[in-house]
Image (cartoon, coloured by chain):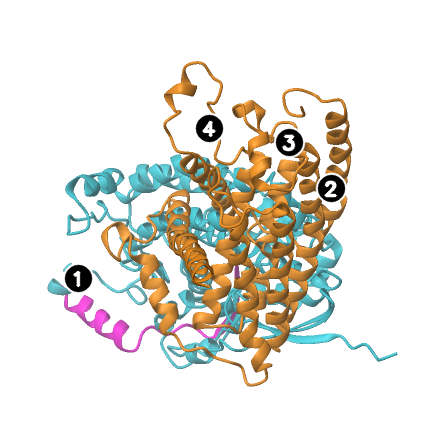
Chain colours: A orange, B cyan
Amino acid sequence: MFNDLLLILWIIIKIIVIVVPLLLGVAYLTFFERKVIGLMQSRIGPNRVGPWGLLQPIADVLKLLTKEIIIPSASNRYLFVIAPMLTITPALAAWAVIPFSQGMALANINAGVLYLFALGSLSVYGVLVAGWASNSKYAFLGAMRAAAQTISYEIAMGFSFVGILLAAGSMNLQDIVLKQQGGFWHWYWLPLLPLFVTYWISGVAETNRLPFDVAEGESEIVAGFHVEYSGITFALFFLAEYINMIMVSTIAALLFLGGWLSPFEGIPLLGPLFAWVPGIIWLFLKIGGFLFLYIWLRATFPRYRYDQIMRLGWKVLIPVTLVWVVVVSLGVEFKIAPWFI
Amino acid sequence: MAEIRNYTFNFGPQHPAAHGVLRLVLEVDGETIVRADPHIGLLHRATEKLAESKPYNHSIGYMDRLDYVSMMCNEHGYVLAIEKLLGLTPPPRAQYIRVMFDEITRVLNHLLWLGAHALDIGAMTVFLYCFREREELMDCYEAVSGARMHATYYRPGGVYRDLPEKMPQYKTSKWHSEKEVARLNANRQGSLLDFIWDFTERFPMRVDEYETLLTDNRIWKQRTVGIGAVTAERAMQLGFTGPMLRGSGVEWDLRKKQPYAVYDQLDFEIPIGVHGDCYDRYLVRVEEMRQSNKIIRQCVEWLRKNPGPVMADNKKVVPPTRMAMKEDMEALIHHFKLFTEGYCVPAGEAYTTIEHPKGEYGVYLVSDGANKPYRLKIRAASYPHLAAIGEMVKGHMIADLVAVISSIDIVFGEIDR
């Protein structure tokens, strides 16, 4: 009995250790995004709150917390309130299986990839419910767009996962990372390059970021599915979006860029030189690179139109993944070194 | 089976892509637009009626506020009408200054248009790049008139005053260190003409920058090619003018076809499109910015070489200088008369047009011989363009509607007047 309680307490501590830095990470990701975009657009970005504007995210959180939650009288109250929770829960729950370094995971389950995929698909329900419950035409259009887009891109994403599963022969995230041991050229990004690119594009589309942000396309349907939300209910959607961004970047780092492994492994001079760097640092650097890519995309590209996104998903990405899954199978069958041994 | 009805909803007036206060009643079948019905009048300020109750010169400021992104061009149209009735010709220097500022205004307008158009299609960065250049042109406005937007700089008979010999300087403050101020003031050491010249040296490179981001971008092309296409014939039937007409392939530019001011002495070309879609209109406007840059350079060169008066020598219309008033009784009386009751314009009517950044801007002025207009009618360039929106977006998707609205370059100050 006492041991069980202790175990639960230990798990809760682990959850807190993951969630609190994650939320802080989201807060400073928004700051980082604003600063980086600011510099790309030849302006300064936030610099008023605190030194160099470092307290800006805190001020934003406080503002959102103290704002009134407006529930439109024509909406479905219960669903309206539940929708943001439906979005944030899977976004947070997915972090349970992420290994931050060897053995550093809340739950090291064998179906890790499947679990991530399942929770990733769940988040669309929150968006759908939000758009429907708001009883607003703009929100409804946004929800429809989001649903169609997420479902189409899930397929392409699923196929790129299939490639990984074939290559690694496992659904356990730890195993997948360990299979990539041996330095930069041994990671899966090279043999699975088309799948890597497809995964990244689908990941950007899944998180509704530019150039695929049609679900909330500001200049078309104002804010899409969360147009009626305010205060903390809006903040939850916002939080979920950014958590999912970090999530997609983390999965990309784990599956294609060797997770916490050092890129200099096996290189005569550099390898030992960087051997002291803990794996988690490498992982964070890789995640940071992907997040920067997210921001870079946002600053550069115009927005796709809704039907063009569908076309890209169905006619380009899915065929590419299908073909490459066959190629990977052949590679595994004939044991092409150094990746498929 | 249940009857399926189309979705009807309001686009605007509170919409981020409505460019002011456009209200569109949209009927959509899924995402496809079946009908788009523009409703206007939310920014109606009765400019034409107001002009009937005050002396001619008092309305120049109202003209700035019509199309509030191409201020001096509006003034030009209005003062030309008055000059036509008075039979007054401004001195050449004033005409060159006017042309120079007309073209600066055209660049200002097209920059805002490009930024807003790109922002509506989702490319956020271009917007801020465009505003960076607009800032310097606004400084030119400020140097010459004291106001960054609503200049009120043109007068019947010329312009309010000659170009300043030195530019206003930044000063050090809590936020700007000495070094930073020196950097900001680097191109402000000479006269306004030097400042403008310096700008025109850099500007083509800046336009290249915008084009790098957009012109060959696959997404940009997918979003604009073939969207809102109007054939040349249909464009003429609908009363299109300016870049909208030229985008459809009709070579019609009042600066060439009915030259006013000194446009007939300047060397520039008229870009035209082929398909009349959003992409062609984009290309036409970008090229117009380059051509305007060329015109500005020619004007700067001429103005440097040819000093002279900037106001016509007509004591009954043009107020005397401050110096003259101190010594000359006659001048003092003229000053008093001009600033209390204004001047009387002979009875008659006049219609003048200029090539406004958005198209043909016309002023129809009827005078009964009094000191204020009997009737003032303004032909807003983008009014017919907006009227054609239903035709242009039919069958397109909601996202295309946004692209079309921004590509026709509407400003409600002008449409509602």
Judge by depth and name the residue closer to the eye, B92 or B399.
Answer: B399
Give the class, few, some or many, for how many residues have Cα within 10 Å of label 3's Cα (few <14, many ≥20): few
Up/down of B399 relative to B292, above or below:
below
Q: Which residue is mark 2?
A: A316
Mark 4 or mark 2: which is in front? Answer: 4
Q: Which residue is mark 3?
A: A193
Residue placed furthest toward the top: A268
Q: Check whether the beta carbons of the residues at disc 4 and disc 3 lie within 8 A of each other.
A: no
Q: Which residue is mark 4?
A: A262
Query: How far is disc 1 from disc 4 in space, using C-alphas?
Result: 79 Å
Give the class, few, some or many, for how many residues have Cα within 10 Å of label 1's Cα (few <14, many ≥20): few
Residue B69 in the image: state x and y as whole percent. 44, 60
Element type at mark 3: helix
Q: Are marks 3 and 2 on the same chain?
A: yes
Q: For the C terminus of chain A, which image quadrant?
A: top right
Residue B216 lies within the magenta run = no
Element type at mark 4: loop
Q: Check whether the beta carbons of the residues at disc 2 and disc 1 lie within 8 A of each other.
A: no
Q: In the rendered view, does A17 fall on the left or right side of B225?
A: left
Chain where mark 1 sits: B
Mark 2 or mark 1: which is in front? Answer: 2
Up/down of A231 relative to A278, above or below:
below
Which stretch did the figure color magenta?
B328-355
Residue B334 lies within the magenta run = yes
Mark number, residue B322: 1
